[in-house]
Image (cartoon, grey):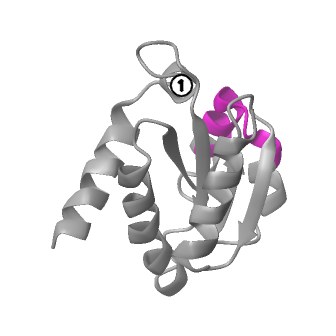
Amino acid sequence: MSKLITTLMLLLALLFAGPASFAADDAGVKKVTLVFVFDKSCRISCDMVRPLLAEIEQTYKDRLRVVELDISPDVKQKTEKKAEELGFKSFLADTSDWYPAVGIFNRSGKKVKELLGAQSKKKYVAAVEKALADN
């Protein structure tokens, strides 16, 4: 039940956050960004990944920002605009046929790792750690 609450809190935070909030926190500190590309029709693998990412976000909450990009047909145009505003347009274009897809970007916005399909929490954590170490 707590994973569900964490996931819901994450989704609400992402829904109400503006584009500038993804680049830096309130103190202006840039964070590593984890971008999660999914489709609402992706029930098994996407639903397996989402709680893992919520746990990782909680673990690294002071140093990591999670962005979810829904490529479902009914919201794809809105998502493409959001991805462009956030600087993830090419990542979204490259991964829109592969979901779930996760991209890990260092503090300067350089892609450190791309993970296609459902992966283990260990792989996501290793990618986040690599991005955190990459100044």
Where 31 falls versus 121 (above or below)?
Answer: above
Q: Residue 64, position in %: x, y?
A: 51, 41
Where 83 falls versus 76 (above or below)?
Answer: above
Residue at 63 percent of width and 72 percent of height: 123
Q: Residue furthest front?
A: 133
Q: Quadrant of the C terminus?
A: top right
Q: Quadrant of the N terminus?
A: bottom left
**Mark 1 element type:** helix
Look at the image and tell me whether residue 3 can be seen. yes
Q: Which residues are magenta?
A: 79-90
Toward the viewer: 129 or 51?
129
Residue at 70 percent of width and 52 percent of height: 130
Where 93 falls versus 124 (above or below)?
Answer: above
Q: Residue furthest bottom?
A: 44
Horizontal side of residue 68 vs 124, given as left or right: left
Q: Residue furthest left?
A: 1
Examine the structure image and report whether residue 83 is included in the region drawn in magenta.
Answer: yes
Horizontal side of residue 62 vs 70, given as left or right: left
Residue at 60 percent of width and 35 percent of height: 82
Q: Residue 66, position in %: x, y?
A: 50, 46
SS majority, magenta? helix
- For disc 1, the neighbor class at 10 Å (few under 14, some 14 to 19, many from 20) is some
Horizontal side of residue 33 vs 2, given as left or right: right
Look at the image and tell me whether residue 96 can be seen. no
Q: Residue 13, position in %: x, y?
A: 33, 39
Residue at 23 percent of width and 68 percent of height: 4
Q: Residue furthest top?
A: 27
Q: Residue 8, position in %: x, y?
A: 26, 56
Examine the structure image and report whether residue 91 is included in the region drawn in magenta.
Answer: no
Amino acid on which the number 1 mark rests in the picture:
Pro
Residue indicated by mark 1: 19
